[in-house]
Amino acid sequence: MKKLPIYLNILQIEEYELNRFLAWVKSHPNAEKLSGKKPLIWTTKIKILYWGSMIIWPISLIWPELSITVFTYLLNPIEQIVLLILKHKTRGKINRLKSQGMKVIGISGSFGKTSMKEILYVLLSQKFRTYRSPASFNTVKGIAKAVNLELEDGCQIFICEMGEYKKGDVKEICELVDPDMGIVTGVNEQHGERIGNVENALATVYELADYVVKKNGFIFVNGRSMTKPGFEIYGIGIYKTPLEQNMEGAEMLALKLGLTRAELKSRKLLVRPFKHRLQLKKHGNINIIDDTYNSNPDGFAAAIKFLGSFEKPRIMITPGIIELGKESLRIHQELGKKMIGEVDLLILVGTNERTVNLARRYKGKKMFIEKISEWQKVVNSTKGTILFENDLPDNY
């Protein structure tokens, strides 16, 4: 039965998408040998799937994926009813708080949403009673749970991060929380494996803009990804890091909410690089740049440029970017080319289409390792800079 909790962990990571879960099972016949980075969270749903599978243990022993699939299907109608009740309760709470003066800010985009949310929270929370949706709670179900459990009377600003995997996702969240204003952080090929292509991603993140514009609200968009008459544009200047770009958009929105430039100047000093997002550390005399959180093409390119400004030798350690779909080959080769002149040693984690295509266009020194933990065995330098770019979840 060793496979059962491992399979449940993967199902949870894949957000209960059975087609992706079953594809993973097919490509990992020796799953019992895997050691997970992210622990299984024993939610009510996971407990039901586990004990349901245990009831039919002869099947679970041989085909745990079959028992998991069966009980996931059986749970679905009940889950839908519970979700409808939860959404109704959430809308009621949002409407009540908005009648008391609360404003809702929506954030959508292929990348940069969490950083934007955290910057806005720092800028606004000292003047307004502010609530932000928790980490990883960016789906309808997650946001509804968070609102009902945590959003309190007297809240003046609710900052809501809106995730998107398919068309209609952002629209559904908008209908749930009714944003008064929004910010679109940018669009690229991130999650292309799920959402299909950039056009689909653009249409989906724009669902926030469409919703807010119909209400005559304010919408701010990253001008590098999109422009449209009537939108407030940011992000077209020259920046050292993505944090600076996000800061510009957050400042524009904060000014609309009544903050003065003097207030912004002091509060900007409170914004720090976020954990695992171009976070600077020291390992002896070596500079460490930790950029292991959920990489995307724009962030990856910015990290390369950032590394290039540091002391040599400049070493980059990366497994590449996941979920790019059909664009993966092109993007990885383009990123490999961008490393030339910025990276002195490229260490690739794993041998697959991502790492092979990064290596193909990069003309400098490179090597492959199987696990990221092996980097100290191959890096002999006692000075310089190491960039850790991206970390893979257990399903990769």
Image (cartoon, grey):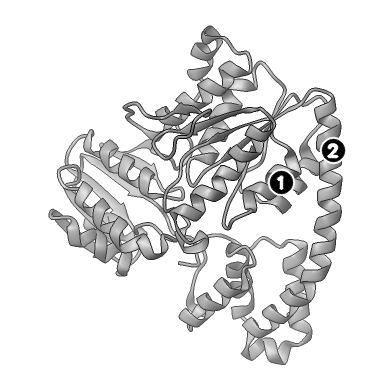
Question: From the viewer's perspective, is 57 left or right of 348?
Answer: right
Where does label 2 land, which residue? 93
Figure label count:
2
Q: Earlier in the sequence, mark 1 or mark 2?
A: 2
Q: Which residue is mark 1?
A: 143
The quadrant holding residue 125 is: top right
Q: Amino acid at mark 1?
A: Ile
Q: Position of residue 95 (x, y in %)?
A: 83, 34
- Against 96, is 372 above or below? below
Q: Residue at left 55%, top 60%?
A: 38
Where, quadrant-wise, is the C terminus in this rendering?
bottom left
What percent of the width, then of the height, locates residue 373? Answer: 36, 59
Q: Amino acid at mark 2?
A: Lys
User: Residue 145 location, x and y as percent?
Assistant: 77, 48
Mark 2 Cα shell of 10 Å, populated few (<14), some (14-19), many (≥20): some
Q: What residue is rendered at 61% in x and 39% in y? A: 210
Q: Secondary structure at mark 2?
A: helix
Q: Quadrant of residue 103?
A: top right
